[in-house]
Image (spheres, grey):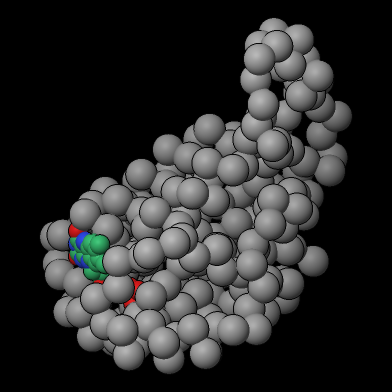
């Protein structure tokens, strides 16, 4: 069974709505989803305090993502609001702490995909998704984008080949039905690719030897990443 870690940050519920739909779609596809939030930062920029407080209640019992969650997953989904054309700083902070598992290649060969929510059209969703793709390259993951060859992506509110995008207009929990269909497709595609790839990997005797932290500490004796 494919283990899917759905790691997200949300402050007014749009990404949480997409992440929850992804979890339901993964389960329907026979995978094992784990919905995980990244830790909040001190003094976050909150535009809608009421929505932020309500979301805090709604996500209270969702576990905080750990590096072990990344290592255990076969497939990774990252969901982020757009912040000035970039991923939310809470996710960037989480990525910054991933060295102990990323450097020794423990995230290599995961399949991964990204989705985003912004307040307006053409305001950074795709740049944000591609910024997270940079991190996935460093982790050695296989990026699974949406492409553009399924009908749902041609609907009025979809169209991004990079990953599902929603436009909230600064309203909380304002995800269009088209976007929910897109994230269902994105999740199903991720699970299918992870399944096929996992079978292939299991049948392949790898000649690759990944370095461990000891190798790096010898090379860079002053380095400390924990
Ligand atoms: C600091 C900050 C910067 C933002 N920058 C952008 C932006 O560049 N483009 C955009 O479309 N929305 C921007 N937004 C709006 C959010 O991305 C948007 O409301 C999103 O739907 C929130 O998702 P959430 O409900 O999951 O928190 C910004 C919000 C904040 C707090």
Which residue lies at the image location 84% right of the left edge and 43% below the top edge?
A: 202
Residue 175: percent from the left, percent from the top?
32, 83
Look at 41% across and 87% down and name the residue there: 53
Q: Quadrant of residue 212?
A: top right
Q: Is residue 87 left or right of residue 193?
A: left
Q: Return the residue nearer the eye: 186 or 169.
A: 169
Would residue 172 be found to the left or right of residue 77 on screen?
A: left
- State the image coordinates of residue 89 (x, y, percent, origin top left): 39, 54
Check the image and name the residue furthest to the top.
Answer: 219
For the N terminus, the quadrant is: bottom right
Q: Position of residue 41 (x, y in %)?
A: 46, 60
Classify 207 as above or below 44.
Answer: above
> Of 182 and 78, which appears nearest the observer?
78
In the image, 77: left or right of 122?
A: right
At 36% from the left edge and 44% from the top edge, which residue is drawn? 131
The number of numbered badges drawn on the structure is 0
Ligand 1 - quadrant of the structure image: bottom left
Is residue 195 visible to us here?
A: no
Measured from the top left, where is residue 115 in percent x and y?
A: 40, 63
Above or below: residue 217 compared with residue 160:
above
Q: Residue at x 14, y 60 (%)?
A: 122
Q: In the picture provided, is 189 more to the left or to the right than 192?
A: left
Q: Residue furthest front?
A: 43
| Whether residue 63 can be seen here | yes
Quadrant housing the C terminus: top right
The relative height of residue 46 versus residue 197 in the rendered view (above or below) is below
Q: Nearer the viewer, residue 131 or 2?
A: 131
């Amino acid at each position: 069974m494919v283990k899917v870690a759905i790691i997200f940050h949300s402050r007014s519920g749009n990404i949480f709505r997409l992440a929850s739909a992804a979890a339901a779609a993964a389960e329907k596809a026979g995978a094992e989803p784990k919905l995980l939030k990244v830790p909040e930062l001190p003094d976050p920029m909150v535009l809608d305090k009421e929505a932020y407080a309500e979301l805090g209640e709604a996500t209270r019992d969702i576990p905080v993502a750990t590096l072990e969650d990344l290592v255990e997953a076969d497939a990774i989904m990252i969901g982020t609001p757009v912040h000035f054309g970039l991923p939310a700083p809470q996710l960037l902070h989480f990525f910054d702490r991933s060295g102990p598992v990323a450097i020794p290649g423990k995230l290599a060969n995961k399949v991964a995909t990204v989705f985003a929510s912004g307040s307006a059209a053409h305001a950074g969703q795709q740049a944000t998704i591609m910024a997270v793709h940079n991190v996935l390259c460093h982790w050695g993951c296989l990026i699974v984008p949406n492409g553009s060859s399924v009908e749902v992506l041609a609907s009025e509110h979809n169209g991004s080949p990079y990953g599902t995008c929603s436009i909230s207009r600064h309203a909380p929990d304002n995800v269009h039905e088209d976007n929910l269909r897109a994230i269902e497709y994105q999740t199903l595609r991720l699970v299918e690719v992870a399944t096929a790839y996992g079978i292939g990997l299991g049948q392949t005797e790898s000649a690759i030897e990944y370095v461990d932290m000891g190798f790096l500490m010898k090379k860079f004796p002053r380095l400390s990443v924990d």
